[in-house]
Structure formats: C-alpha cells, structure tokens
C-alpha cells in the first residue's frame, strides 16, 4: 500500500509551549486513522499543520511523496486536496448553505455557478439536507451545520479529509447524524484523519488508532489492539479514565 | 421646556430666532444653497468609502513584504485624524490651488472637499479596520482551508461580514460628514450655512440658522432610520430567532 501522507519529525510550538514534538507517522491511501489523547496532546494542531493552516517549526510533511511544507510551496493548491472540518463548523454566516458550498468551487476551481450548484445539490441530497439549500447557517441545528461543513469540504473532492473533533460541539442526540455521514465516507477511497473524543466511534470506524501524548505518537496500532490491549502505560491510563467516565464500554 | 418662555427676554429671542416671516423668506435660498452641500456630500462619500476600505485592508495585511505600505497608512491615519478638519480645509483648500493650477482645478470648492475626504477617510478606515478585526480567525481558517487566497478570503468572507457589523458606526460618521460639509463654506463656496449667514446679516435675524438646522435634520434623520431598517431586515433574513 502506498503512503498518502508522511510526517517526518514534525515539531510545532506556540511560544514556549511545545505542542508537537518530533512526530513521525506514515498514513496509507484510503485509510481511516483516528487520533486520540488528552486535551492538549496536539491532535488539533497536528491536523491544522497538515492542512498548512499552521506553519511547522521543524520536520516535513509529504503528500504523495511531495514535500508540502517546503519553503515557497504554494499552499492553496495543496489545501484543495486536503479538506478540513472544524469542531465549531465555521460556516460563513452571511452566505446561504448553497453559497457556502459553491464559493470555493466557483472562485478556486473556476466552475460555473450552475455546475457548482448542482454539486452542492448532490452533496446535500446525499446528506439529507436538500431542503436546506437556501437556508442560512444560523437557522440550522448544530448537526445540520456540521453536515453542511462536511459537504463544503467534500465539494472540492479532496484526497484527504481531516475531521477535527467534529462532534465535540454537538448535543448528544445530534452526534449520530454526523457520524453516519463519516461512516458513509469510509471506503470511498478518501483518506480520513479524525481527531476525536468519541472512543466508541473511533473503535468502530478506524483502521488504525494513534494515541498522542506530549506531542508525539505514544502508541499506534489497530483499533482492536489499542482499545483492548494497549501496551503504553499512558494509553492504558488514558483509556482507564475514559472508561470510568462512561465514554467507552470496557 | 416650559420654563424657557417665562424667561424675561424670551420675547426678543423669539423674534430674532423664531421669526416665521423670516423663515419663509429665507427658506427658498437655503434650499437652493443646500444643493451644493448635497453635491459635496455625494462626491466625497463614495471616495471616502473606497479609500477607507483600501486603507483598512492595507493595515490588515499580514504579508511581511507589505510592511512599508502598512507604515505609510498608519502614518496617514495618524496625521489625518490628529489635525482638526477645519485646518485641513484651510491648508488644502487654499494651499493646493495656490501652486498654480489652471481652471477649473484651482477651485477651493474641489480642494476643500478633498481635504474633507482625506480626514474622513482616515476616521472611516479605522471603523472598517475594527470590523475586519472583529471577524473571528476561524472564518479565515475555514476560507483558507478551502484553497481561497488571502485576497479572495478578504473579499468574499471577511469584508462582507465586517461591513455589515460596522454599518451603525459608519452611519454615525456619514451623518457627521453631512454636517461637516458646511465647513467648506469657510473657504468660499456658498452652501447652506453661508447662505444662512448672508440672510442673517441682511435681516439682522438669526432665524435662517434655524431653517438651516431644520433642513439638515430633514436629511440626517431619515438617513439613519433607513439604515436601521436595512440592518433589521438583514438580521431577520440570516439570523437565528431573536431572544426577547
């Protein structure tokens, strides 16, 4: 299997706070990989670095064997190939759902308004939101907004999709509808990277699970192995806490 | 309110400020002179808005290569805001035509309006900049993550939200500009305030000033109410339901 993404000794600090510490990892094409770990372990920063929203201090990131973090690489064409969905949705409040999705299609990919609109329509129908196409984001529920955000990212047909704790800001009863969308994406050929606190879901959907601690990969293995037989002491401790908080059946 | 008419010299004030006959006499002159105010307002406003947005954008850029541009616009806003409007009108309105320009470019009217526009663009730029900075960083992140360039992000995502937010303070500045147009009269052009002054001198009566005030109010109040209406409509269209 070929490597879609390779991270090579990636480090990132904010001031004196070292968030990523020489993190190295290879991710296969079409793989679903979940990043778990305590708050502040670097999950979100890692995804933002891959999307080039943050500039890394050291190391390198490669997409299809091309270094994307090299100085002078134009970030815009790379970002089209790597989509990201945020914890707080970040839809554009002054635009209708349709325009949220078509904006990058018309402005970045140069599609006509009709082409873009029909892509938006197809995606929204697929996610059960076709009746919301002319609504404004503030009129939608959190779950609906997040599904629109996923549709917006998918509209550009990215090869990699980064999902940054996409259910953390949702009411429990709305989590399911968003996770259903992610389930549907698995096996479509897209490479999925999830930062998540939904352990049950991570266990169910992931090919591999990566436990992050202190800004680096503490343990990496199949979902089965990480959740049932973790070897790293920090992973064991973390999962113990998660289980006692009732977020994962032991 | 009720006490004023009981003051000992009310009668005299009433006669020299609230004289119905003088008001109806001077009103047509005033209205005619007011056309010039509206003209000055009409050509300075678009120029101010455009220059101000450009200044605000220049100040909000993050490209290190544009550092000199940022320094320039910061200096511009500081200097323009730091000197009284009236001084700029004198300096530019009399100074620039003095360097030997030909008609019609040596008119104090043109350069007075330019001075007004320069000062106001500095104020309005700060309003726009506040708006730009009030748009949350996550909006920029979302736009950039979709592959939009920084100028596309500014144009489609940041500015439209920023401008909506600053409409009330912007209106404030526009109402203020509408009135400061009268300052241009100090270097010559006969607009409403000067016309009122002329009429006052002619009849030795202050009522024309009251007439001028009424005319200003007749424009500024509907203007403000209209903006309020537009804002409410926009909020109803895009916003979540209101909390009571």
Image: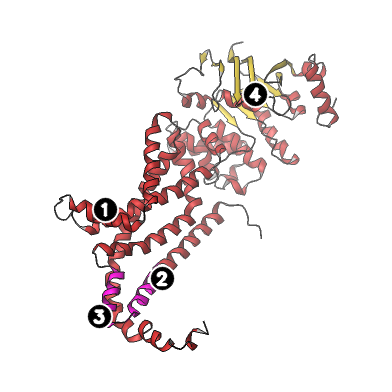
Can I make out residue A206 in this image? yes
Give the residue at mark 3: B202
Residue to which mark 4 is pinned: A19
Magenta-drawn stretch, dominant element (helix, strand or loop)? helix
Give whichever of discs 1 and 2 has the lower sequence position: 1
Q: Nearer the viewer, residue B26 or A240?
A: B26
Q: From the viewer's perspective, is B69 left or right of B169?
A: left
The colour scheme applied to this rendered structure is secondary structure
**Which range of residues does the magenta coloring cover?**
B190-219
Whole-number angstrom distance, CA of label 4 to CA of label 2: 59 Å
Let me know if marks 3 and 2 both belong to one chain. Answer: yes
Q: Which residue is painted at 67% across and 31% down in the image?
A: A165
Q: Residue at x 50, y 27 (%)?
A: A80
Name the residue beneath numbered marker 1. B92
Classify mark 1: helix, strand or loop. helix
Mark 1 and mark 3, same subunit? yes
The kind of secondary structure element at disc 3 is helix
Separation (CA) of disc 1 from disc 4: 55 Å
Quick one: SS at disc 4? strand
Question: With respect to residue B75, does B124 lie above or below?
Answer: below
**Pointer 4 with pointer 3, Cβ within 8 A:** no
Chain under label 2? B
* Residue A62, above or below A153: above
Disc 1 residue crowd, few under 14, some 14–19, many 20+, Cα 10 Å: many
Mark 1 → mark 2, Cα distance in angstroms:
29 Å
CA gap between label 4 and label 3 equals 78 Å
């Amino acid at each position: 299997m070929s490597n879609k993404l390779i991270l090579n000794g990636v480090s990132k600090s904010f001031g004196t706070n070292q968030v990523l510490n020489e993190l190295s990892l290879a991710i296969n094409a079409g793989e679903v990989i979940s990043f778990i770990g305590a708050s502040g372990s670097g999950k979100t920063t890692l995804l933002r670095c891959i999307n080039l929203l943050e500039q890394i201090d050291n190391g390198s990131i490669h997409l299809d064997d091309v270094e994307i973090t090299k100085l002078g690489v134009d970030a815009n064409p790379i970002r089209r190939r790597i989509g990201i969905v945020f914890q707080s949705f970040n839809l554009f409040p002054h635009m209708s759902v349709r325009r949220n999705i078509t904006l990058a299609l018309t402005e970045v990919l140069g599609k006509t308004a009709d082409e873009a609109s029909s892509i938006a329509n197809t995606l929204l129908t697929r996610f059960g939101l076709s009746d919301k196409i002319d609504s404004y984001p503030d009129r939608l529920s959190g779950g609906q907004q997040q599904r629109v955000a996923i549709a917006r990212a998918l509209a550009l047909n990215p090869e990699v999709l980064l999902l940054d704790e996409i259910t953390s800001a949702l009411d429990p009863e709305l989590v399911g509808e968003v996770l259903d969308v992610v389930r549907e994406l698995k096996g479509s050929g897209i490479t999925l990277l999830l930062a998540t606190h939904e352990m049950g879901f991570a266990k169910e959907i992931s090919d591999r699970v990566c436990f992050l601690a202190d800004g680096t990969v503490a343990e990496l293995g199949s979902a089965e192995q990480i959740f049932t037989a973790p070897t790293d002491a920090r992973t064991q401790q973390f999962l113990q806490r998660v289980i006692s908080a009732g977020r994962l059946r032991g | 309110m009720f006490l004023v008419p009981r003051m000992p010299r009310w009668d005299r004030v009433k006669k020299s400020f609230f004289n119905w006959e003088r008001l109806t006499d001077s009103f047509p002159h005033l209205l005619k002179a007011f056309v010039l105010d509206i003209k000055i307002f009409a050509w300075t406003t678009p120029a101010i808005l455009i220059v101000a947005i450009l200044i605000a954008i220049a100040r909000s850029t993050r490209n290190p290569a544009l550092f000199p541009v940022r320094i320039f616009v910061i200096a511009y806003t500081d200097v323009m805001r730091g000197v009284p409007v009236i001084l700029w009108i004198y300096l530019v309105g009399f100074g620039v035509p003095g360097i030997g320009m030909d008609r019609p470019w040596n008119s104090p009217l043109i350069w007075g309006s330019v001075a007004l526009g320069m000062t106001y663009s500095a104020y309005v730029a700060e309003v726009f900049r506040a708006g730009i900075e009030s748009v949350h960083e996550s909006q920029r992140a979302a736009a950039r993550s979709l592959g939009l360039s920084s100028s596309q992000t500014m144009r489609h995502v940041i500015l439209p939200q920023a401008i909506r937010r600053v409409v009330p303070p912007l209106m404030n500045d526009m109402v203020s500009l509408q009135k400061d147009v009268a300052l241009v009269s100090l270097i010559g052009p006969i607009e409403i305030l000067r016309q009122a002054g002329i009429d006052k001198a002619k009849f030795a009566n202050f009522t024309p000033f009251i007439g001028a005030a009424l005319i200003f109010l007749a424009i500024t109040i509907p203007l403000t109410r209209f903006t309020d209406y537009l804002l409410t409509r926009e909020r109803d269209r895009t916003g979540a339901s209101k909390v009571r």
